Image: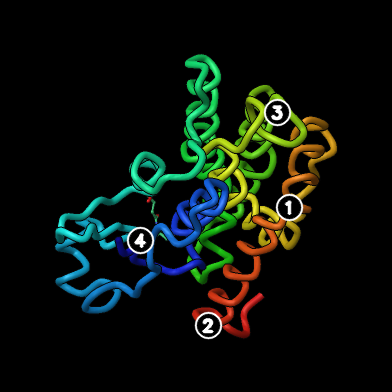
């Protein structure tokens, strides 16, 4: 199976992190976008021209990082990232949704500016003063453990969290929006995640990929 995209994307990293958490890091081969980014071929695999997407050995393909994680979790062997207890599994799914919807929307204005786009002062002020604290407060109520987001082993919530928070750490300080002291559970959990070998591996990949695509920029 080929995972198309680059580690500079947290959504690509989510899949690579998930495979490492499963103990099956070779479950996919990371590949460039066939035909090039935003090529006709790219759009044939992803209608929005985004990364990642997965190309199976039979040529069929799948977009959306969380759907890809759930698919590789089912077929790549190794440990499952879906908690066996249904309620715990639902809570892992909730964390992914809070991250992908509320958190991602909240950091949007800062992310746009950091990557050369624009956002108004009002948008940044609202993000910092309202949307981001709201999303972080929500996450604070969802994180249950210091080592794992929920349950007693890695779940796909940890993979999603790790990939998104690399960018929190990387981007938010320059906007004065990186203070997590109001969120003690989140802080303890995130501190532990950063010490893990899986995070260090992901960070090394993302740093290298960022340098390749955006070298020179902060
Ligand atoms: N919901 C998608 C998000 C994918 C996404 O936004 N990817 C970004 C890179 S981080 C992208 O390809 N952006 C290019 C574009 O939107 O043109 C997923 O989970 O896979």
- Give the label on residue 37, or none: none
Report the residue at 73% width, 28% height from top. 145
Q: Which residue is mark 4?
A: 51
Which numbered mark, 1 or 4, is in the foreground of this view? 1
Percent x, y of residue 97: 47, 32
Which numbered mark, 3 or 1, is in the foreground of this view? 1
Report the residue at 27% width, 78% height from top. 36
Q: In the rendered view, would you say 210 is above or below 99?
A: below
Percent x, y of residue 150: 63, 27
Report the residue at 70% width, 24% height from top. 144
Compare marks 4 and 3 and give the one earlier in the sequence.
4
> Few, some or many C-alpha atoms within 10 Å of disc 2 (few <14, some 14-19, many ≥20)?
few
Where is the C terminus found, in terms of image quarters?
A: bottom right
Where is the N terminus found, in terms of image quarters?
A: bottom left
Mark pair 2, 3: CA separation: 34 Å
Ligand 1 is in which quadrant of the figure? bottom left
Compare marks 2 and 1 and give the one earlier in the sequence.
1
Q: Secondary structure at mark 4?
A: loop
Percent x, y of residue 93: 48, 28
Mark pair 4, 3: CA separation: 29 Å
Ligand 1 within 8 angstroms of badge 4 C-beta: yes
Q: Nearer the viewer, residue 118 or 192?
A: 192
Q: Which residue is mark 3?
A: 140
Q: Nearer the viewer, residue 191 or 171?
A: 191
Q: Which residue is mark 1?
A: 196
Percent x, y of residue 15: 45, 53
Q: In the rendered view, would you say 46 is above or below 35?
A: above
């Amino acid at each position: 199976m080929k995972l198309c995209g680059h580690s500079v994307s947290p959504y690509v990293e989510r899949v690579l992190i998930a495979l490492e958490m499963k103990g099956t890091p070779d479950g996919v081969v990371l590949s460039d976008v066939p035909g090039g980014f935003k090529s006709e071929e790219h759009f044939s695999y992803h209608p929005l021209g985004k990364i990642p997407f997965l190309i199976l050995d039979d040529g069929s393909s799948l977009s959306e990082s969380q759907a890809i994680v759930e698919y590789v979790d089912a077929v790549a062997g190794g440990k499952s990232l879906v908690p066996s207890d249904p309620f715990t599994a639902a809570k892992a799914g909730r964390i992914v949704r809070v991250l992908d919807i509320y958190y991602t929307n909240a950091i949007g204005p800062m992310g746009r500016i950091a990557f050369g786009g624009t956002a108004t002062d009002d948008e940044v002020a609202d993000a910092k003063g309202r949307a981001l604290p709201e999303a972080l407060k929500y996450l604070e109520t969802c994180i249950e453990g210091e080592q794992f987001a929920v349950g007693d082993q890695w779940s796909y919530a940890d993979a999603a969290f790790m990939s998104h928070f690399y960018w929190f750490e990387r981007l938010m300080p320059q906007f004065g929006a990186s203070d997590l002291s109001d969120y003690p559970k989140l802080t303890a959990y995130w501190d532990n995640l950063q010490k893990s070998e899986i995070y260090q591996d992901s960070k090394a990949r993302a740093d290298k990929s960022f340098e390749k695509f955006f070298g020179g920029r902060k």
